[in-house]
Amino acid sequence: MVTMSFLRTCGKVLPKRCRLVTSLGATVALLLTLGLAGSAQAASGRTFVNLATGFCLDSNSKGEVYTLGCNGGPYQGWSLGSTAFNGVVTLRDQATGRCLDSNADRKVYTLGCNDGSYQKWTVNNGGFGTRTFRNLATGFCLDSNGGRKVYTLGCNDGSYQKWR
C-alpha cells in the first residue's frame, strides 16, 4: 500500500524508482484485469484460442507461427512478460523460449527475444472475455484465418483478431 509519506519521499528523493514502481503497478493491474497474470498461468504458459476458428496460437522450433487444434502441448503455451511501457507485453513461447515477432510486411513469427518494438504487443479488451494484440511497432493486430495462418492486419474488431 502506498502511503502519503512514500509519495512525498518518492517525488523528492527517488523520482526514477517511483516512476518504475508506478509503471510496473499499472502493468500488473492491467494484466490481472484481463486475466493474463496468475501463478498457475505463469508456470505453465497461457493458451490463446482464436475466437473465430477455435484454433490455438502455436509455433515450432523453426520460428513459424500458425494456429492448430488445441492440444495442450508446450508450443501452444505462451508466457507474458511486462515491459517498461504500460499495458505492453511480450509473448514468449514456452517450448522454444522465442518471442512472438512481426514486421511491416504483416508476417508473424518467433525470434530470440530482443526487447525490440516488433516483439511488443498492446493488449486490449476485445469484449466477451476476449482480447486483441496490437503490435507496438506496426500498429497492426494479430489475426488468423480458417487456413490456420497467423499474420497481422489493420485492426478491425473482427472475430479473427480476438483471442480468449
Image: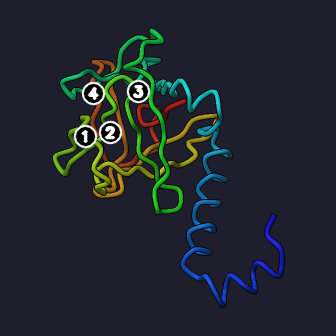
Q: Identity of the amino acid at label 4?
A: Val
Report the residue at 44% width, 30% height from top.
78
Q: Which of 42 and 68 is in front in this view?
A: 42
Q: Name the residue under label 1.
A: 112
Callout 3, which amino acid? Answer: Gln
Q: What x and y, as percent, mark residue 93?
A: 37, 30
| Helix, strand or loop for disc 2 | strand
Q: Are marks 2 and 1 in contact (CB under 8 Å)?
A: yes
Give the amino acid type for the residue marked by disc 1 in the picture.
Gly
* Residue wearing tag 3: 94
The mark that comes first in sequence, 1 or 3, is 3
N-terminal-most mark, 3 or 2: 3
Quadrant in the picture for residue 11? bottom right
- Nearer the N terminus, badge 1 or badge 4? 4
Q: What element carries label 3?
A: loop
Does the residue at mark 1 contact the one at mark 3 (Cβ under 8 Å)?
no
